[in-house]
Image (tube, helix red, strand yellow):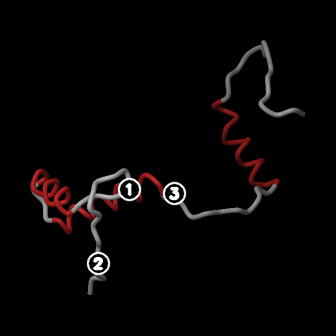
Amino acid sequence: MSDSLLVKFKDTDSPYSVTRKTVKSLAKHLDVSETMLVNIALASFAKEHLPNYEADNAALTDQDIHAIKQAAKPKLPKGKLLRKTSLFEM
């Protein structure tokens, strides 16, 4: 079973709303139904604004940091250090 959503359109197009005329025109231009157009628009908006991962506020453990350093080690540049800078004061 699908959920339904009532959409109320505005009288004018703006950065945050569209008119029913715009929806009809865009649906016709893309050769999709109005329902499909709304789903496409919402899917695009979600992809742009929602993270692709679950929120994780836990701190890294010493074991996590060690594993990251070990995984990064072979990819780090080799040779003489010419200059060292930091974004953070140490």
- Kindly identify which residue carries mark 3: 51
Rendered position, 5 above or below 73: below
Circles 3 and 1: CB distance less than 8 Å? no
- Does 84 sit left or right of 2 as displayed? right
Q: Secondary structure at mark 1?
A: loop
**How far from the left and from the top, in percent, is residue 2?**
27, 83
Q: Quadrant of the N terminus?
A: bottom left
- Cα separation, mark 3 vs mark 1, equals 21 Å
Q: Quadrant of the C terminus?
A: top right
- Kindly identify which residue carries mark 2: 6
Disc 2 marks which amino acid? Leu
Q: Residue at x 61, y 63 (%)?
A: 55
Q: Residue at x 66, y 42 (%)?
A: 71
Mark earlier in primary sequence (2, 1): 2
Residue placed most toward the observer, 50 or 28 = 28
Disc 1 marks which amino acid? Tyr
Q: Dot 3, crowdedness within 10 Å: few (<14), some or many (≥20)? A: few
- Does 2 sit left or right of 27 as displayed? right
Mark earlier in primary sequence (3, 1): 1
Q: Residue at x 74, y 53 (%)?
A: 64
Circles 2 and 1: CB distance less than 8 Å? no
- Does 43 sit left or right of 27 as displayed? right
Residue placed most toward the observer, 65 or 19 = 19
Q: Dot 1, crowdedness within 10 Å: few (<14), some or many (≥20)? A: few
Rendered position, 11 above or below 85: below
- Cα separation, mark 2 vs mark 1, equals 17 Å
Q: Residue furthest front?
A: 11
Q: Residue furthest right?
A: 90
